[in-house]
Image (cartoon, rainbow, N blue to C red):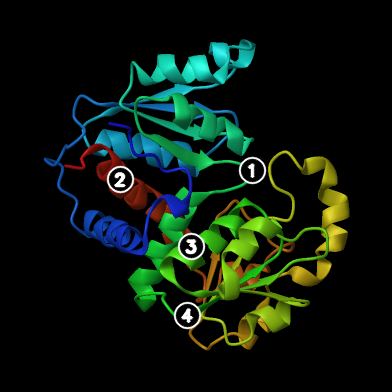
Amino acid sequence: MQPRHFISLLDINGSEFRSLINRAIELKNHRNPDYQPLKGQVLGMVFEKSSTRTRISFEASMAHFGGNAIFLSPRDTQLGRGEPLEDSAKVISSMVDCIMLRTFKHETVTTFARHSSVPVINGLTIEQHPCQLLADMQAYFERRGDIQGKTVAWIGDGNNMCHSYIHAATVLDFKLNIAAPAGYQPNKMIADAAGERIRFFDTAIAAAKNSDLIVTDVWASMGQEDENKQRCSTFKGYQVNAEIMDTAQNDALFMHCLPAHRGEEVSAEVIDGPQSIVFAEAENRLHAQKALLEFLLCAK
């Protein structure tokens, strides 16, 4: 039987997504040290990109569940010395129970999945960041209930996070308003596939109007540092600040996957203010990924 992978939010349906969220909330609120469903199992973690939240949350998840995690980087393995991905996937998957990759090219993860005999998890690619959306949606559900029918505003770069928000809107059935500068909008095929749930706006103010959740990300992601000066100029009108939040619903929440640059994509008064739930969102990486690992490795 082929293993079940988690490469994209489109790999799960709405019922499964909600079950993962509810299970994550349960695991968060009622931790049982004696519950170790992954005892004796190993997660292989392949990192081409550096990480704080992804690495800690997956390692802690395996430890809490009685398993182990192995950190693998191109510097330490044959992955960085030209071994074909297909061969690496076959070898690594023969020795571990699950593989998580945080990498640049999305094709790296999809190639691993095609040749792996165990579940493969997308920990981040330049195209998508589905694990972060599990945590984000958990944070929203905890405070406002189901997001179905609500309106989310994405303000800033049409990057991997934006793509995964588009997928989340498709799976959980909410509306997504997107404000991104020309030339920095999300992949057209990904956006078009979501249909009428996605709307584009020329200004951040327009996208934020009456929204229930405002989300942004850094203007220059990892690997784009040389574009930072240009991007700061291009994105100048896309900062999430008090004016933007005042345009949204009175009880609107603010999210950011972190790390954040105060004074650039978000003002300090917003990210450190009462509507911001960025640190609860970050903590939820642990609980959401525990639910995901349980879902992939303990399915009956």
Name the one closer to the observer, 247 or 21: 21
Residue 176 appears in view: no
Which residue does the numbered mark 3 point to in the structure image? 168
Q: Of helix, strand and loop, which one carries label 1?
A: loop
Residue at the image position 59 percent from the left and 62 percent from the top: 193
Mark 2 Cα within 10 Å, few/some/many (few <14, many 20+)?
many
**Residue 218: which quarter of the image?**
bottom right
Which residue does the numbered mark 2 point to in the structure image? 290
Q: Is residue 96 above or below residue 255?
A: above
Q: Earlier in the sequence, mark 4 or mark 1?
A: 1
Name the one closer to the observer, 182 or 51: 182
Q: Earlier in the sequence, mark 2 or mark 4?
A: 4
Left or right: 48, with 174 as reference point: right
Residue at the image position 68 percent from the left and 41 percent from the top: 222
* Numbered tag placed on residue 126 in the rendering: 1
Residue at the image position 48 percent from the left and 62 percent from the top: 168
Residue 60's spot in the image, x, y percent? Answer: 33, 38
Q: Of helix, strand and loop, which one carries label 3?
A: helix
Say what amino acid the circle numbered 1 marks: Ile
